[in-house]
Amino acid sequence: MPYSGEVTPGGPSAVRELDEVVVRKASVGPMDNNAYLLTCRASGSQLLVDAAADPDRLLALVREGSGSARLAVVVTTHRHADHHGALDSVVAVTGATTAAGADDVAGIPVPTRRPLRHGDVLTVGHLTLEVVALRGHTLGSIALAYREPDRDPGRASGAYRGADAVPGRVHLFTGDSLFPGGVGNTQRDPDRFAQLLTDVRERVFDRFDDGTWVYPGHGADTTLGAERPHLEEWRRRGW
């Protein structure tokens, strides 16, 4: 079935198959958190974004991707408890490395083996993901950006490095920093809101094109093209 990004707690995963990676999205826990499993198609190595809740469901998600618990790293997008409730259990079973924004490490009860900063690169199998710091929802909130291989404009698929190559689409895992309809909650703090909106503008909308797919920490997916016309509206309303 075509990928829709629609998931419900206890329901099946939504699966998106790309040239280099398979993305699986599942919803877990009482707060309907999204968890994302990225599986490198060449190596089988896997990365989990937010071990939010329900470790049995998340371990089943890992097995969906590889047939076994071959999880290399778990990235926690920020320190709020609903995004790492299953982290201890998942890491205990899989031995995966833990990673999170450096400024949120102190607020995550499971030790973080790799503190992440803006511009860092994570490598999982043949995949590379860029760390994008989006400060405001929490000080150490991060997003992960994966870019598909460049393509030949005359072909439907396959990597291409010619002079007329079309840049591959970006896939952005934003935690609670960017959603359909606005940025993450900053508790009406004007300074935190200004910081988050600035980071989202400069580090996301100014860098990535409208085709960029956004996978948030809760709810439905979106694209930058769908959200870009509303940036000024968000600034005026202050949340």
Image: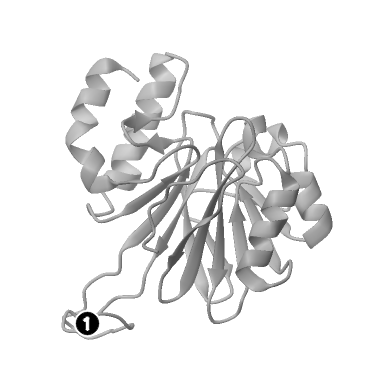
Relative horizontal placement of residue 104, taking residue 134 as reference (left or right): right
Q: Residue furthest right?
A: 92
In the rendered view, tell whether residue 163 sits above or below residue 6. below
Rendered residue at 40%/30% (across/down): 196
Q: Which is more toward the observer, 60 or 21?
A: 60
Q: How many marks?
A: 1
What colouring style does the render use?
one colour
Q: Quadrant of the N terminus?
A: bottom left
Rendered residue at 49%/68% (across/down): 22
Q: Which is more toward the observer, 108 or 41?
A: 41
Query: Where does label 1 land, which residue?
Result: 152
The kind of secondary structure element at disc 1 is loop
Three-letter code for the amino acid on which mark 1 is drawn: Asp
Relative horizontal placement of residue 96, taking residue 194 as reference (left or right): right
Rendered residue at 42%/13% (across/down): 188
In the rendered view, tell whether residue 69 sits above or below residue 8. below
- x, y percentage for residue 95? 79, 61
Q: Is residue 98 visible?
A: no
- x, y percentage for residue 20? 45, 75
Q: Is residue 91 visible?
A: yes
- x, y percentage for residue 97? 72, 58
Relative horizontal placement of residue 227, taking residue 106 as reference (left or right): left
Rendered residue at 41%/71% (across/down): 18
Q: Quadrant of the C terminus?
A: top left
- x, y percentage for residue 141? 53, 38
At label 1, counting other C-alpha atoms closer than 10 Å, the crowd grade (few under 14, some 14-19, many 20 or more) is some
